[in-house]
Amino acid sequence: MRKNRNINQLRDIEIIPNFSPYPEGSCLIKCGNTHVICSASLDLNLPRWLKNTTSGWVTAEYGMIPRSTSERMSREAARGKQSGRTQEIQRLIGRSLRSVLNLKALKGLQIIIDCDVLQADGGTRTASISGSFVALHLCINNMLNKKIIKKNPISESVAAISCGIVDGEPLLDLDFEEDQNAGVDANFVITETGKLVELQMTSEKQLCSEESFNSMLKLAKKGTAQIIEMQKKIISG
């Protein structure tokens, strides 16, 4: 049984918009003890393979600072290459954001999302997605106000959350300890209208039954709906 919150309860979430003064859009998102700075920067240079097309682009980069965890990790720049985990996560963030965008409305433009994990206690990728959407939306608002684009390319909101089966019980929004003890671990990316963008699930210690999966999906939809409501209040404020 979970110690300090109900099985269907999110960790305390705080989203601080415009956290950084320089990017076109930014926020600090705190999900319990997981803290991530998300920045959205306008770039006038498209990837080579998109030049002379009718499309724009949104991409993401992700990283953890050396003491974001209990033991210091070396910087990936010092190692000379990104880990497979880092590449997987930043691609996930980019795919999640592009799923709710009309890229043609960004013709000739690129928005680069940077997610820097200051503190990690589970759910860094899901927090990065939920925070990145806020940073992206603020960036889009900035571009609309400056008449850089004419139309808002965002079709709907998107957020992400983790779920798991721990000691046979479905839990929402796993912290690091819960994640380590989970028999089944899943990350859900879900839109405002309840559509599934992406699902990552592993049965590390036990196989996942249909009943267990449905219980996690139900929790994930409830959790992402709450996050999206928070995102909308932050953006409209």
Image: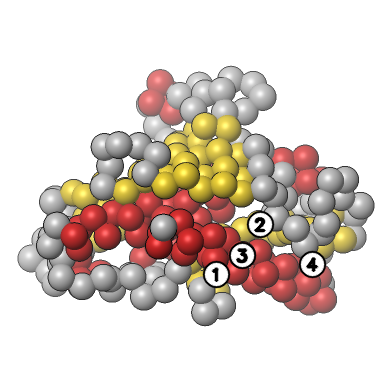
Marks counted in the figure total: 4
Mark 3 sits on what residue?
226
What's the amino acid at mark 3? Gln
Q: Secondary structure at mark 4?
A: loop
Q: Amino acid at mark 1?
A: Ile
Please give left or right for residue 116 compared with residue 104 in the image.
right
Going from N to C along the chain, the mark reached first, 2 or 1, is 2
Tell which circle, 3 or 1, labels the residue nearer the N-terminal end: 1
Question: Does residue 105 show up?
Answer: yes
Write down the residue under mark 1: 190
- Mark 2 lies on residue: 162
Q: How many residues crowd mark 4 within 10 Å: few (<14), some (14–19), many (20+)? A: some
For marks 4 and 3, give the CA distance: 26 Å
Q: Position of residue 141 (x, y in %)?
A: 27, 60
Q: In terms of secondary structure, where does tag 2 sit?
A: strand
Against 181, is 94 above or below? below
Name the residue at the front extreme. Answer: 237
Q: Earlier in the sequence, mark 1 or mark 4?
A: 1
Circle number at residue 208: 4
Which of discs 2 and 4 lies nearer the camera? The answer is 2
Amino acid type of disc 4? Answer: Cys
